[in-house]
Amino acid sequence: MHHEWRRGEFTISTDPGRLDLAAIHAFLSQSYWARGIPLETVARSIEHSLPLGLYHGERQIGFARWITDRSTFAYLGDVYVLEGYRGRGLGKWLTEVAVEHPEIQGQRRWVLLTRDAHELYRRLGFTPLARPERYMERHWPDVYGPAAPPPAAR
């Protein structure tokens, strides 16, 4: 079931059929967190997520996605609004809609990573990790670049 929210001339939709994969890839492949990401990887990541597209008319101007098992855990990622649309509260609205999404409610843990939007997410109830010493990761920051390890090494 797809959901839709409207605010004036802007729409947020969870319909994957509306997503402009080329536009999402164009932004993500230049972002600080996914620089160089292949189009096929973006497509696969969306296929296995709960996506939210932000639209001005029919043009996609923003995106966010929940990576979730739809039961216990959700990770909010790939959140963006195109530069020309920033400063209008659209990023705040997109993240508010994301955290209010009915399929995310009742899950035990939500997490996200951000370099510079801590205040935005803090207002939505996100806090620094309560027990950071319990978290571990395997991280390949250049996975999409020329120095990326071969797939078997990941």
Image (tube, helix red, strand yellow):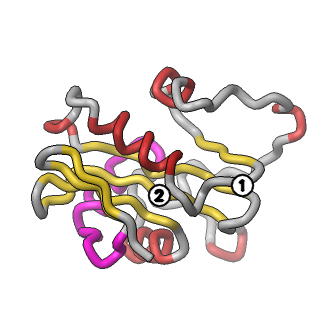
Instruction: Farthest residue to the top: give it.
Output: 119
Report x, y in % for residue 149: 62, 64
Placement of the N terminus among the 4 image quadrants: bottom left
Residue 27 visible in this rendered orientation of the protein: no
Report x, y in % for residue 17: 30, 78
Q: Earlier in the sequence, mark 1 or mark 2?
A: 2
- Looking at the picture, tell me which residue is in the foreground, 12 or 112: 12
Amino acid at pointer 2: Arg
| Residue to which mark 1 is pinned | 107
Report x, y in % for residue 38: 40, 69
When the figure is inspected, residue 149 is found, relative to residue 5, above or below; the finding is below
Labelled disc at residue 65: 2
Q: Which residues are magenta?
A: 15-33
Q: Is residue 116 left or right of residue 70?
A: left
Mark 2 Cα shell of 10 Å, populated few (<14), some (14-19), many (≥20): many
Q: CA distance from mark 1 to mark 2?
A: 16 Å
Could you tell me which residue is drawn at 56 percent across and 25 percent down? 122
Report x, y in % for residue 133: 88, 33
18 drawn magenta: yes
When the figure is inspected, residue 76 is found, relative to residue 132, above or below; the finding is below
Amino acid at pointer 1: Gln
The count of marks equals 2
When the figure is inspected, residue 94 is found, relative to residue 123, above or below; the finding is below
Could you tell me which residue is drawn at 52 percent across and 46 percent down? 99
Could you tell me which residue is drawn at 30 percent across and 54 percent down? 5
- Looking at the picture, tell me which residue is in the foreground, 42 or 84: 84
141 drawn magenta: no
Which element carries disc 1, helix, strand or loop?
loop
Could you tell me which residue is drawn at 47 percent across and 58 percent down? 65
